[in-house]
Amino acid sequence: MLIETFKVGPLFTNCYILTCKKTRESIIIDPGFDSKIEANKIIKTINSNNLELTLILNTHGHPDHTCGNGLIKDSFDVPILIHRFDSQMIGGATMENTLLFGLKNPSPKPDILIVDGNTIKFGVIKLKVIHTPGHTRGSVSLLSDKEFFSGDTLFSGSIGRTDLPGSSRYDMEKSLKKIVSLPEYLLVYPGHGPETNIGLEKDTNPFLRILNL
Ligand SMILES: [Zn+2]
Ligand SMILES: [Zn+2]
């Protein structure tokens, strides 16, 4: 699997393009860009590398992860996937929420609602959906053979906020317990900030210690 990372939008959200090396089929995770300029850079990358984009995947419903959904969908006409518990956070009357984040483009409605245990396939690559609520009710992480895409649940040295509407500290603790039981070699690609791995976070992340994990 090829992984390209773009830091996008005012909150420096990590947007990932994942590509199957064999078939060139790709998916985009969290297109959190709010401007046509940023969108065009990513659209150009997809086109100039002959990637076949198959879907848009949101780790959760916050506008800084979803506000580029429409810009990508306009160009490639691919479905938007999000966990069913965050489905109300995008599309429809979410402009207020989008503006609260200082962003202009609300996402269109989702096309496919995902749940824990679903498998996302592109080419020969499979990503397993793991429901990791806490930051939002419908936050998901995605697991492949060597990689773990953690959204705003786990960051390098930190964790996602649990003081927002729809957040739950209790759920976050349960989700982090799930994550620390995963293999230590897994590379973690978070929703913001640098990459890390499960072993390093278990050893050094103070938030995992506070929660006695
Ligand atoms: Zn978030
Ligand atoms: Zn975020």
Image: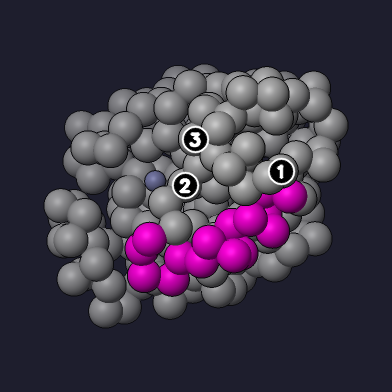
- Residue 139 is left or right of residue 115, and the answer is left
Residue 175 highlighted magenta (yes or no): yes
Front residue of 17/134: it is: 134
Judging by the rendered image, the residue that carries numbered circle 1 is 213
Q: Position of residue 91 (x, y in %)?
A: 35, 72
First-in-chain label (1 vs 3): 3
Using a 10 Å C-alpha cutoff, classify the residue at mark 1 as few (fewer than 14 neighbours), some (14 to 19) or many (20 or more): some
Q: Is residue 74 at least partly visible in the picture?
A: no
Front residue of 14/212: it is: 212
**Quick one: SS at disc 1?**
loop
What colour scheme does the image use?
Answer: one colour
Q: Position of residue 207 (x, y in %)?
A: 55, 39
Instruction: Mark 1 vs mark 3: give the one in front.
Output: 1
Could you tell me if the residues under marks 1 and 2 are in contact, i.e. CB atoms within 8 Å? no
The part of the chain drawn in magenta is 163-177
**Quick one: SS at disc 3?**
strand
- Residue 43 is left or right of residue 10, and the answer is right
Residue at 48% x, 22% y: name it: 194
First-in-chain label (1 vs 2): 2
Judging by the rendered image, the residue that carries numbered circle 2 is 160
Judging by the rendered image, the residue that carries numbered circle 3 is 158
